[in-house]
Amino acid sequence: MATCSRPLFVSASAASSTSPSRASLRRLHTVAVVSIWEPCPPLRVAACCFSQTKHCCRRSTKCLASGLSVSRLTRPIKRMLSRYSSLMTVLHSNINQCCQAMSALRQDGASKHFLSVGFGRVVLGVVLVMSISAASYTAPSSSALTEENLLFLEAWRAVDRAYYDKSFNGQSWFRYRENALRNEPMNTREETYAAIRKMLSTLDDPFTRFLEPEKLKSLRSGTQGALTGVGLSISYPMAINGPPSGVAVMTATPGGPAEKAGILPGDIILAIDNRSTEDMDIYDAAERLQGPEGSSVDLSIRSGANTRHVILTRQTVTLNPVRSRMCEIPGAKDSSKIGYIRLTTFNQNAAESVKEAIKTLRDNNVKSFVLDLRNNSGGLFPEGIQIAKIWMDKGVIVYICDSQGVRDIYEADGAGTIAASEPLVVLVNKGTASASEILAGALKDNKRAVVYGEPTYGKGKIQSVFGLSDGSGLAVTVARYETPAHTDIDKVGVMPDRPLPPSFPTDEDGFCSCLRDSMAPCNLNAAQLFAKS
């Protein structure tokens, strides 16, 4: 059974939070307190002392506010600093006198006085000298924080609590907060957003990012099952030399505007409404592709060596993540009927849709399955775990790790298993990413399936989404993961067991045709398809 003790994906309801209270921020925003020991005047002992003897009491800065303030002590402190050597001499002399006096008191059986007034005043001076640097660098109290400061602190707290690497890219995360509150302009909402983006950039993690309210809404709607847009799943393109540029098409939703216009996986979007995507953030591109139903968007598309302009009309696209069909292979014995299941994304419908497809194919006497994860860019982490449990009755699915090592383990416990024994093949390519890689790695390492294709994308980190009080949010990398064989696939990917023939089709009809036609260049020997050695 799964032994994870902390959730790795925060739902929309759980992620949203209200603005932190002044009291909670006061607990977080630590302020250096100068505690002073000195003789107490008789009339002020009751008002100022937390603990006391007849001649001494401890006074906090609250007590100082009603009496001698730190600011009023500036001149005496400067004078004491200039006379530091002489003060140390006096202190040494007074300590000796104090010890002699205490010895005499013990001999006399008296215990009423153990420190002289003179000694107490010298201790006051030394404590102030030692504490002045802490007092000078005290951050503003919570009562002095603006609404913009509070929003920044809210974002800082989310990262502080959830970010998987507690070294924060080798910097003091608390010190960064203090410096930002002093030095970063946060007079407007846009300035605050800029300060948050700057803070996140110091982590050097492209997946930990700030989401304006519109982008957060778009991200959440993309996992719900329906979306108003053109029906494209996009990613950064893979680049052999230098950083990638533009936006790559990972998959086109069946029946959506993009698929009808002939846009294919692997195509590059060069511009959206005449704005170049060369330096465009992928989440900005996704937002621009979405819009009101019936509105249009102009795309510049590169397919191989050809470039064309396409004008698409946005519509509400139902994100059914699964397509399936049965392939009959003439002449085959044990694998005469193969169930083909194509999983395009891990939204909240994914696990149930896979179960329904398996049951429907079984009704047609299917005895073996092909799970196609090509160009599946991932989605909800919990859905990936549930789909692994459909195919596995036991075994580790994934190890969740932070900078200290393995933190949590997800395992199959047999509870959700419905297809643990039938022969299974998994198809992957360089567009297989994130939750798809977790699933493929689990099935491969547990020897539950034979993996065909090419190395996957290599996104070995997991993000959670945190809502902020103004409707914006953060996607924060909360963990990295390892496959059951303790393979870290980040920037490497899952290695397939066998390659696919060149130009192997990505649609279900083409898949079945390649299996039937033994003379086709894309043919896979159906009799050997499920062989594990």
Image: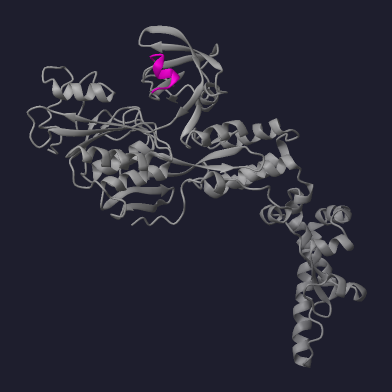
Left or right? Give the position of 436 relative to 97. left
- The structure residue drawn at horizontal position 73% and vertical position 35%, both measured from the top left corner, is 186
- The structure residue drawn at horizontal position 39% and vertical position 36%, both measured from the top left corner, is 434
Foreground of the two, 79 or 72: 72
Left or right? Give the position of 500 relative to 349. left
- The structure residue drawn at horizontal position 68% and vertical position 42%, both measured from the top left corner, is 151
Q: Is residue 408 above or below residue 476?
A: below
Residue 233, x across and y down, in percent: 43, 26
Foreground of the two, 398 or 333: 333
Residue 333 occupies quadrant = top left
Left or right? Give the position of 390 relative to 290. left
Q: Is residue 381 magenta?
A: no
Q: Give the extent of the magenta segment.
A: 255-262
For the question of whether residue 298 can be seen, the reply is: yes
Residue 143, x across and y down, in percent: 78, 50
Residue 516, x across and y down, in percent: 14, 23
Q: Is residue 23 above or below residue 452?
A: below
Foreground of the two, 532 or 366: 366
Left or right? Give the position of 267 relative to 108. left
The quadrant of the rendering that contains the N terminus is bottom left
